[in-house]
Amino acid sequence: MKLMQTMLAVAIGAVAWQTAFAADVTLRFHQFLPPQATIPAKAIAPWAQKVEKESGGRIKVQHFPSMQLGGKPPELYDQAKDGVADIVWTVLGYTPGRFPKTEAFELPFNSGLAEPASRAFQEFVEKYAMDEFKDVKVIAVHVHGPGLIHSKDPVTKLEDLKGMKVRGGSRIVNIMLEQLGATPVGMPVPAVSEALSKGVISATTIPWEVTPALKVQQIVKNHTGFAGQQGLYTQTFVVAMNKGAYDKLPADLKKVIDANSGAETAALFGRAMDEGDKVGLALAQKAGNKIIMLDAVETQTWRRTAAAVRGIWYKEVGAKGIDGPKLAAEAEALIAKHTKK
């Protein structure tokens, strides 16, 4: 009898211990890249660990990479809105026309290093574009580093791009590619490797950061960058949380999420992008690939040709009552402000 009582006491104690240390809340974090890719490994994982630690273990962030909760990358934002996932990381350009104000940051030759540009983008969204995110809780927004071209055949001058099937990751990037003479092919980044391997595309626009996860440096052997600090383009991202999941948190746990939202979280994701760019470049160099850096004269030719994108964008967003020139100027000013710091 005493033995049974002792065993019962131990069992009750074990349950009590588990209850005391169990998370109060589990947040499902869904995104489209494999866990070893730069952002999942170097931004999402440390962010989640910080949230868990600062909550005293009361919040558990459960990471679902590679679309493990189902759906396709363009559906991620709505998954956060509808509660399919509690938090998502996604590319804003995967849902064309939904975030028109944010496209000011995607205009050609607008952005360089990802960390200062991400700080700038966070400030921009907070000032001018929060109305585009009214159906979610924005944890942070950010951009990637200088965008460049990775191709099967070398691209050493603008004419080399003529008629080439090039993957673009957003509406603005595809407009730019068309202006530059390429044949744009839109697709989310997880589809790039197969599309290159099967010849659906001959080149892709992505930053160095994501090339290792996609093994792009093994599939193509030519990489074209540009003179100056700015890349050919950048793309914009959001870490978005379901409003209901946030609203039902107790006040002290809301403070934990709030403390891990905003400018410093944007900078965390931007820094990860910048560090990832170094890794991607080094792997391409190690593979003996051809790194083509266009000189200032050739880069200026690309700049002049791509400048037409601004006029197209101004007209499109102007039809929606948006002051495109003002937003573009503000984007440039904020990037310059944060880059100088």
Image (cartoon, grey):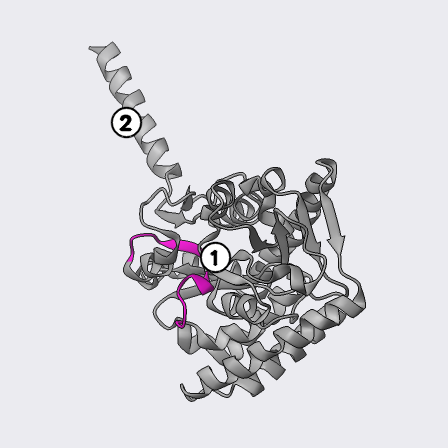
User: Residue 134 sits in which quadrant?
Assistant: bottom left
In the figure, is residue 191 to the left or right of 153? left
Kindly identify which numbered label has been placed on residue 12.
Answer: 2
Q: Residue at x 66, y 64 (%)?
A: 159
Q: Position of residue 61 (x, y in %)?
A: 42, 45
Q: Position of residue 323 (x, y in %)?
A: 50, 88
In the figure, is residue 297 to the left or right of 334? right
85 is within the stretch colored magenta: yes
Kindly identify which numbered label has been placed on residue 141.
Answer: none
Extent of the magenta region: 83-98
- Quick one: label 1, few (<14), some, or many (20+) residues within 10 Å? some
Q: Residue at x 74, y 53 (%)?
A: 292
Identify residue type, mark 1.
Val
Determine whether 272 is above or below 221 in the image: below
In the figure, is residue 247 to the left or right of 210? left
Identify residue type, mark 2.
Ile
User: Residue 335 sits in which quadrant?
Assistant: bottom right
The residue at which mark 1 appears reads as: 256
Q: Residue at x 55, y 76 (%)?
A: 104
Marker count (numbered):
2
User: 335 or 194: which is nearer to us?
Assistant: 194
Q: Are marks 2 and 1 in contact (CB under 8 Å)?
A: no
Q: Residue at x 46, y 64 (%)?
A: 93
Looking at the image, is mark 2 or mark 1 nearer the viewer?
Answer: 1
Q: Quadrant of the N terminus?
A: top left
Q: Position of residue 229 (x, y in %)?
A: 74, 65
Q: Quadrant of the C terminus?
A: bottom right
User: Residue 230 sits in which quadrant?
Assistant: bottom right
Residue 197 visible, this angle: yes
In the figure, is residue 314 to the left or right of 17? right
User: 176 or 274: which is nearer to us?
Assistant: 176
